[in-house]
Image (cartoon, rainbow, N blue to C red):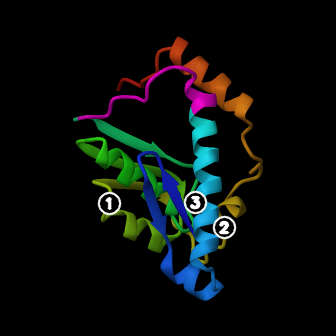
Amino acid sequence: MGAIGTGGVLMLNESVVAVAGISPREIEDAITREEIELERREQAYRDDRPPPDVQGRIVILVDDGLATGASMRAAAVGVRRLGAAVVVVAVPVAAGDTCRELRVLADEVVCLATPEPFHAVGCWYADFSQTSDDDVRALLARARIEPPRVAVP
């Protein structure tokens, strides 16, 4: 039905809320639960490090795929509020409508495939298992140690 992001970003899919008959109280309860989870994840993944400074920078937001795009919209709005100069969305697979809608919030949307019918992100992966907190922490630690590999033509 939507997504939240750092800095009080809230993206609600009003049509989903209406069709599902979700009450304002249920929305508030969901926001409260998700804010607690967002805070937990930020602490778990950042430790005591501050958030990255995106002011005036190019920010590339990457996801494994986009169905409704609510989380990506929240991320794009969040980094814009933090002063990102350019926002690029990069995904391997997404619903075509979602990519078109994101072009309003992002300066560029890079999507390798927009299959029709789309159904769900998981349909396009052989293994779509969840990434654990430990996996995320290990990958972030490795990224801090190893410089990024850039292909030079």
Q: Are marks 3 and 2 in contact (CB under 8 Å)?
A: no
Task: Locate residue 41 relative to residue 82 in the image: left or right.
Answer: right
For label 1, the crowd category at 10 Å Cα-Cα, with few meaning under 14, some 14 to 19 and many 20 or more, is some
Q: Which amino acid does label 3 sit on?
A: Ile
Going from the N terminus, do you reach mark 3 or mark 2 first? 3
For label 3, the crowd category at 10 Å Cα-Cα, with few meaning under 14, some 14 to 19 and many 20 or more, is some
Q: Can see residue 17? A: yes
Q: Which amino acid does label 2 sit on?
A: Ala
Query: Does residue 80 lie above or below 3 as drawn?
Result: above
**Which label sits in the foreground, 3 or 2?**
3
Which residue matches tag 1? 105
Q: What residue type is labelled 1?
A: Leu
Tell me which segment is drawn in magenta. 43-55
Q: Is the magenta stretch mostly helix, strand or loop?
A: loop
Which quarter of the rendering shows the C terminus?
Answer: top left
Residue 31, disc: 3
Which residue matches tag 2? 120
Residue 148: give x, y in percent of width and height: 46, 21
